[in-house]
């Protein structure tokens, strides 16, 4: 046992030492470059939304990206991506970190690291209010006559295909206007994150979130990063301090209460309080 206590730290250091000692880590690369490249889809209120007129990004995770860039002492560059292209763009090193309501899942974890979670959530339906009682359970939803609409390439589509075997799954490519399809009666429901259903029922009074306080499953939101432990350690510490200090809570509450229905699409420039200057680039257009 005495020998084991002596050798164990040596063995552990041999395993993790190179990752920490590598001078070519992402943290140093970002600071030397002077720019933090943040991948974001711009189609997921309240986390990330790109105004179609002004081209400006806004939302919880855009403000948080600005705060992370400020903590690093660098400029912020938003790199546009899409949910179907997210991991491809990540693998091609088009951004340093993905921020914008990214859900933690094991497939993404195989190729990347996640920060500590900043929000806990789950999938739940949203439908026209008169249909609330019809879609309380997956058994009620999974019927041949039910039309479930999904945006492609993300966890919403994955959940629908894993759980709906009889309902018709209709893929709609625009995650910004997909809820208008429900209002127009072109689909019966969408299963998405509870936080999004709460916001969308506020923006579209014809729609109602179905039991968002008790979603069908459990998920977490976090920031997706390369397998660089120095960079992850910095992001985790920054995020932990932001949550504990209340800074994240203030940003969260601001965008939950934001009058999206009045300002979206009006071309009004969004001013990022206390954030570093923003440049915008595109990895791949949705």
Image (cartoon, helix red, strand yellow):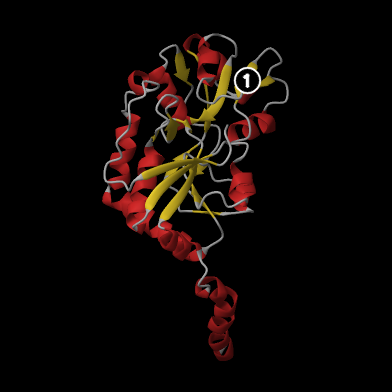
Q: Residue 56 versus residue 273: which sits nearer the camera?
A: 56
Mark 1 Cα shell of 10 Å, populated few (<14), some (14-19), many (≥20): many
Q: Is residue 159 visible?
A: yes
Q: Residue 232 versus residue 278: which sits nearer the camera?
A: 278
Q: Position of residue 275 (x, y in %)?
A: 31, 46
At horizontal 32% and vertical 33% (from top left) the residue drawn is: 270
At horizontal 44% and vertical 59% (from top left) the residue drawn is: 33
Question: Left or right of 204: which side holds 132?
Answer: right
Q: Position of residue 15 (x, y in %)?
A: 59, 75
Q: Is residue 193 above or below residue 205?
A: below
Number of labels in the image equals 1
Residue 168 sits in quarter? top right
Q: Residue 185 versus residue 225: which sits nearer the camera?
A: 225
The N terminus: image quadrant:
bottom right
Q: Is residue 222 visible?
A: no
At horizontal 61% and vertical 48% (from top left) the residue drawn is: 108
The C terminus: image quadrant:
top right
Q: Position of residue 210 (x, y in %)?
A: 49, 22
Question: Left or right of 218: which side holds 54?
Answer: left
Q: Is residue 280 above or below residue 141?
A: below
Q: Secondary structure at mark 1?
A: strand
Q: Residue 233 versus residue 28: which sits nearer the camera?
A: 28
Q: What residue is disc 1 on?
A: 148
At horizontal 58% and vertical 90% (from top left) the residue drawn is: 3
Q: Position of residue 243 (x, y in %)?
A: 33, 49
Residue 83 sits in quarter? top right
- The residue furthest bottom is 3
């Amino acid at each position: 046992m005495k020998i084991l206590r002596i050798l164990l730290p040596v063995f552990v250091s041999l395993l993790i030492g190179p990752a920490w000692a590598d001078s070519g880590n992402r943290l140093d690369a970002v600071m030397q470059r002077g720019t933090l490249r943040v991948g974001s889809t711009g189609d997921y209120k309240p986390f990330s939304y790109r105004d179609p007129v002004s081209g400006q990004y806004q939302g919880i995770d855009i403000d948080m990206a600005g705060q992370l860039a400020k903590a690093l002492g660098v400029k912020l560059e938003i790199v546009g991506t899409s949910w179907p292209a997210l991991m491809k763009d990540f693998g091609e090193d088009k951004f340093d970190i993905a921020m914008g309501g990214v859900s933690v899942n094991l497939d993404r974890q195989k190729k990347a690291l996640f920060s500590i979670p900043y929000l806990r959530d789950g999938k739940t339906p949203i439908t026209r209010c008169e249909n609330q009682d019809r879609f309380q359970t997956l058994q009620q939803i999974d019927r041949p006559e039910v039309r479930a609409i999904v945006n492609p390439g993300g966890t919403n589509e994955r959940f629908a295909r894993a759980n709906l075997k009889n309902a018709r799954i209709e893929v709609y490519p625009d995650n910004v206007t997909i809820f208008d399809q429900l209002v127009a009666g072109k689909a019966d429901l969408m299963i998405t994150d509870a936080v999004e259903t709460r916001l969308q029922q506020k923006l579209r009074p014809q729609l109602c979130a179905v039991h968002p306080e008790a979603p069908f499953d459990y998920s977490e939101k976090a920031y997706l990063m390369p397998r660089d432990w120095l960079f992850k350690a910095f992001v985790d510490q920054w995020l932990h301090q932001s949550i504990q200090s209340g800074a994240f809570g203030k940003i969260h509450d601001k965008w939950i209460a934001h009058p999206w229905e009045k300002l979206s699409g009006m071309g009004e420039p969004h001013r990022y309080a206390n954030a570093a200057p923003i440049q915008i680039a595109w990895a791949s257009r949705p």
